[in-house]
Image (tube, coloured by chain):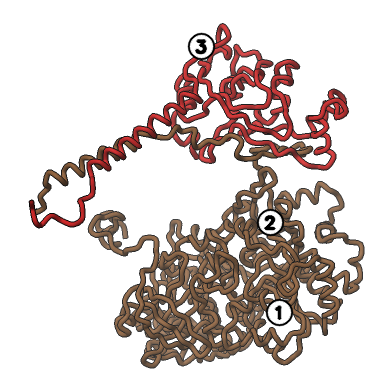
Chain colours: A red, B brown
Amino acid sequence: MSPDRPKRRPFPWIRSIMAAGVVGALIVLGGQLLEQERVGGESPVTEAGPRVPGAVFPTDTFVGKDVPQPINYSHKLHAGDLGINCLYCHTYARRSKVAGIPPTSKCMGCHTIVATADEKPEIEKLTLMWESGQSPAWNKVNDMPDFVHFSHERHLQKFLFDNPDMNIEDSREVCAMCHGDMVEVGVAKKMRPLTMGFCNTCHENNDGPADCTRCHK
Amino acid sequence: MATKIDRRSFLKVLGLGGAGAALAGCDMPSYATMEEGEEQVFSYLAPEEYVVPGIGVWYASTCLQCSAGCGVHGRVREGRALKLEGNPDTAVNKGKLCQMGQAALQTHYNPDRITSPRIGGKNVTWPEALAFIKEKVTGAPVWMTGSISGHQAVLLDAHLNASGGGAHYAVETINAQAWQAACADTLGDAQPNLHIDKALCVLSFGADVLGTWVSPVKFMADYGKFRAAPRGVLTVVEPAMTLSGANADHWVAARPGSEAAVALGVAQVLASEYSVSTSALPSGAADAIVAMTPERVNALSGVDAKTLSKIAETLMSNSPSLVIGDGSYETAAAAMILNLMLGNVGATITPSAELVPADLGVRSGSTKALADFAADAQAGRIGTAFITGTNPAFTAPGGLKIEDALSKIGLKVAVAMFEDETTQLCDVVLPLASSLEDWGSHVPATGAGRGEIHVQQPLMEKLHPEVLGLGDILLGLTQDAGADGLEDFEDYYGYLRTAISAMIGADFEPEWQAVLQAGKVQAPTADRSFTANGALNFNVPETKAPPAGRLSLITTARQGLFDGRHANLPWLQEAPDQISKAVWDSWAEIHPTTAAGLGLKDGDYVTITSDSGAITTRVFLYKGVHPDAIAVPMGRGHTHYGRYATGIGVNPLNLLDGTADGRTGEFLNTTSVRVQATGDNRHLVRLMDVDQQYGRKLAATISADQLRRNQGGA
């Protein structure tokens, strides 16, 4: 027996470090599991042939959250079944960095004539807002961080307007590069990861600029 | 090295390093920073055709952050003003804008804005507030404002005339009244045009042309040209270094209040050594020059004969020159005498154009007006006072007893954007629109534009529905008072548009739109010529070294917090001071020799006591201040000015005793104080904390002499 054994037990360094390692590993694995669940990774292009001629079409998929909206607007109905061009409503996309939510006046342009408030409860909600001078408070689905500057105008210019092989009416194929096939979903959902890795891969494949300050200003 | 790493420590380091590496590797998925459904986005109901979200539109307006009146362009996107820049089409600021102008956005979006009328601190409606005023008003109302011009000034006069002929007190702590008085006395033109850009040498006595004097953005642009080849020489004589002094080729420290003696001393050297004639000077000037021998200059100011000769030599070898002086009437008048001797009048000083609609002209603020106001209030001559654009409870010298004076006034109505020391003492507070929400017209402080009047238009809707523009409030009050000819105007916009259209003879929408687009309108002007001058009465103060234990307190003005009105703007609190590089706090500049005499080192707290009060702040040892002086910048030390300004730093203005200049009645900026260490020491937070580079040559320097040897040249 050693008589001068210290009263306080030394801190268990080795065991603590091992415990920290296990916690770290769990965080890593958990993050990866989460990522696998949300990001589908490489999947085959669903349609035959290039959807946007002259461009490598991103194939990453992403399972976005269901984001509740004040009005259950259906992209499937408007852009899919009725075949309305994306740029008819998101008219600012070709002129500005933001695509913009269509003004209520645009909705009411049709809905005072077709599918009116008397026929559809959702349109009734819209009409009441319009008459009381209130804009619907839409919840943002695709929200870039403030340090990322993405320009809709620039991307449409390259892939749609300056693309000689592209049919000018097929804007939805260009939109689908980043937004997925919105014609398949009802209320909007995020369908691409829209991470820096996603942007970078597409920029590499399609000769987009690679300098940091082009997007981070 | 005796340190030995044993096996145990080695394992610890290895283990910790490994854990760190493992944690660093486990990056969160990057879309964790991206949100879905967290923020809201509102669409327009029915947008204007030209509105495109994400694309900014620039509108012309006018900056009201100081009384210079620079033209601005403001970028508006989605109905919000986002950025201000100078209007390139104005003669005053030519597309440039200073930090105070840039920070107007923070004035506008400030969370401490007053959003509703208040009576005794309680929110009320406008009808209630107006009914209260109507009921309580006694006597003829008076107005106390900052410098004011344009159509607001016309309406202000109309209100005073219609309601009993009360007085208008235009109050500005940072002003150029002494210079204007000297120019009026010598040239018959209080605001002659100054051409720094045409001068080869500028000599300034206490006028901070690059920082706060009259129209700093205009002078900075001119200074840029002045410094281009051939490079002009700048000499500055002042007791504590300003931004102009820091840029000078030759900086001379003069004892506080003795700048006039130095200027007259230079005049004597010019007369005796360079035979410059003094015969054409106003009577009284020649005698004053003869009396100011180099020995006397040295006794009064501490500036030696060699320095005087050097200044005179610089003036003689770089012609034309320009001499500017402010701070006291004697200093300004002595500077004007130098200009007259050197033939600068007509060369770098030219007559300003006379504004034909004279009622639009600038009512330049002064501190004399504050003294008059206090005296009138104390004597019970003021029954009702409207106060806007000035904060007398913060800026008044302690000797004035402004709180006491205000308490003698029956009804005090503040028209203000923020609660401050003055609104606290007022009975009614009316919420004022910001400069980005209001209409107006403003005559710039310098006559550079020859009658160009800057037009102010709102850049966006009012942030708070209850606020009203100054013009609207004045129009309403004037209509209520029963003034003739104003009944038809629904709002100030209608009045302004009618008045400007009538002035330029425009009847149609396109002409009015052109005025708004340009942000300015040309008023008719008349030429003016300098008139013969009368006598000058010099009363050069007998400055001498202060008695032991006392120093001269100088309250210095800085571009940024200015006279304290911008202390509630975090951008300007955060912007390092131009001299000390300090942020978010006050300090007292003191010469290292003086500090050594008092046993003070950097960061020591001192209590500075005058007859009017005391402040406690820390000292900053700095050679750019006269050894007889202690300099405390004004602007901080608010007790009631919102979340960003309250309790930050100390206010030296209240320490001044209120001694007035004999000719102009302006408060002199110095007062005798006692300085005592408290024993505390704390570090002053500064950008660029040390003055040395530890031999690392971070900023390479070369002496002028060495450069000449290496590079050749004269």
Residue that appears at 76% across and 57% down: B465
Does residue B687 appear to the left or right of B432 in the view shown? left
| Mark 3 residue element | loop
Does residue B652 appear to the left or right of B488 in the view shown? left
Q: Which residue is mark 3?
A: A44
- Across and down, in percent, residue B398 comes to 57, 85
Residue that appears at 36% across and 69% down: B683
The quadrant holding residue B162 is bottom right
> What is the chain letter for disc 2?
B
Identify residue type, mark 1: Tyr
Identify residue type, mark 3: Pro
- Across and down, in percent, residue B305 comes to 35, 83
Question: Is residue B215 visible from the viewing direction of this image?
Answer: no
Question: Is residue B583 visible from the viewing direction of this image?
Answer: yes
In front: mark 3 or mark 1?
Answer: 3
Residue that appears at 27% across and 43% down: A16
Image vertical order of residue B228 relative to residue A78, above or below? below
Q: Which residue is mark 1?
A: B169
Image vertical order of residue B275 relative to residue A1, above or below? below
> What is the chain letter for disc 3?
A
Of residues B92 and B55, the one nearer the viewer is: B55
Residue that appears at 32% across and 60% down: B714
The quadrant holding residue B179 is bottom right
Q: Which residue is mark 2?
A: B436
